[in-house]
Image: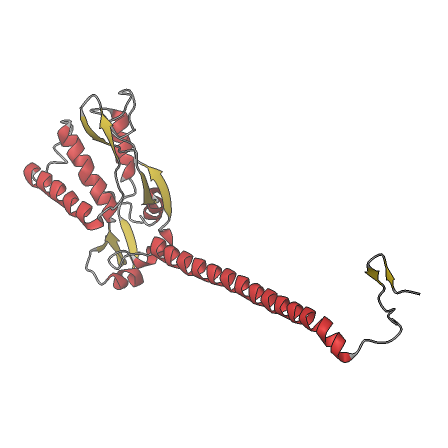
Amino acid sequence: MSTTLSGYRLLRKRDFSQEPSKDEEDATVGPSRTCRSLRVAFNRLYFVAIHCCIFLAIFFWLQNHKRLKHLRTRILPSELQFAQDVIKYEEITFDPSGFWDDESQHTAFEGGVSPAIDEAWRSLTSVGLLSLTQEEYDATNLTTIPVPGKSDRYLVTIEMFHQIHCLNYLRQRLHGTASLELSKHGDAAHLDHCIDYLRQVIMCHGDLTPITLTWSQEMEWIKPNFNIRHTCRKFQSIWDFALSRNTSGLMIE
């Protein structure tokens, strides 16, 4: 019988009962094993690389977070070192104060002569003078007077409250409400002191917060936007601390 049918040639029947030779097996399986090995190696390398990236990201985030936390809670060398835990920060958007879009708007501290405004300013410095223990006083490496009748307690006032006192005095002079008692140290000297002292304070702190600008059609010139967000030490936290340390009952005048 012819082995060719209509142009097709019959192949020899293979005996599948026999095991393939080693050469045949290597020729068939070899490339497959190599591909699988490469895939496994690549997957392992990819797995390690991903975890390394995650680890590095977490490491750098923790380092940056630690650095920022240190900066945000750092107390300066000239400040009361035992007040470290008092320092807290908050984000505050400043008021334009005097440059409101609505002229009826104002803060509790703006305006002329008013018992309510005077009381608002007085409340800011109503914490009085602070009393330091002997250990706290020794750590300051400064010289001050003791609390009357208490040789182991020493008096100081915090700069912030003195600065507010100075600003309030300028406000009173501007609006003609400064009393003779406030002027007893010499009016001209007191004015010069407060003006130049506050200049030093502003230059000392060197606030780098940017103030944005807009174009004013009315003024035909650029106009600063004072509604700017600032990072501030929490005033209330410092105020509460200062009040708790006023064991002498003496006030700021």
Closest to the observer: 24 or 166? Answer: 24
Q: Is residue 54 left or right of residue 147?
A: right
Which image quadrant for residue 29?
bottom right
Q: Quadrant for the C terminus, please.
A: top left
Closest to the observer: 207 or 168? Answer: 207
- Is any part of residue 98 visible from this angle? no
Residue occupying image coordinates x 36% and y 42%: 91
Residue occupying image coordinates x 17% and y 35%: 169
In the rendered image, residue 189, in percent from the top left (x then y), is placed at 7, 41
Which image quadrant for residue 122?
top left
Q: Quadrant for the N terminus, please.
A: bottom right
Count of marks, rendered view: 0
- Is any part of residue 85 visible from this angle? yes
Which image quadrant for residue 62?
bottom left
In the rendered image, residue 9, in percent from the top left (x then y), is placed at 83, 63
Residue occupying image coordinates x 30% and y 23%: 105
Q: In the displayed structure, would residue 145 be above or below residue 28?
A: above
In the rendered image, residue 30, in percent from the top left (x then y), is placed at 69, 73
Residue occupying image coordinates x 47% and y 59%: 57
Closest to the observer: 44 or 203? Answer: 44
Q: Is residue 19 left or right of residue 250?
A: right
Coloring applied to the structure: secondary structure
Q: In the displayed structure, would residue 23 be above or below residue 138?
A: below
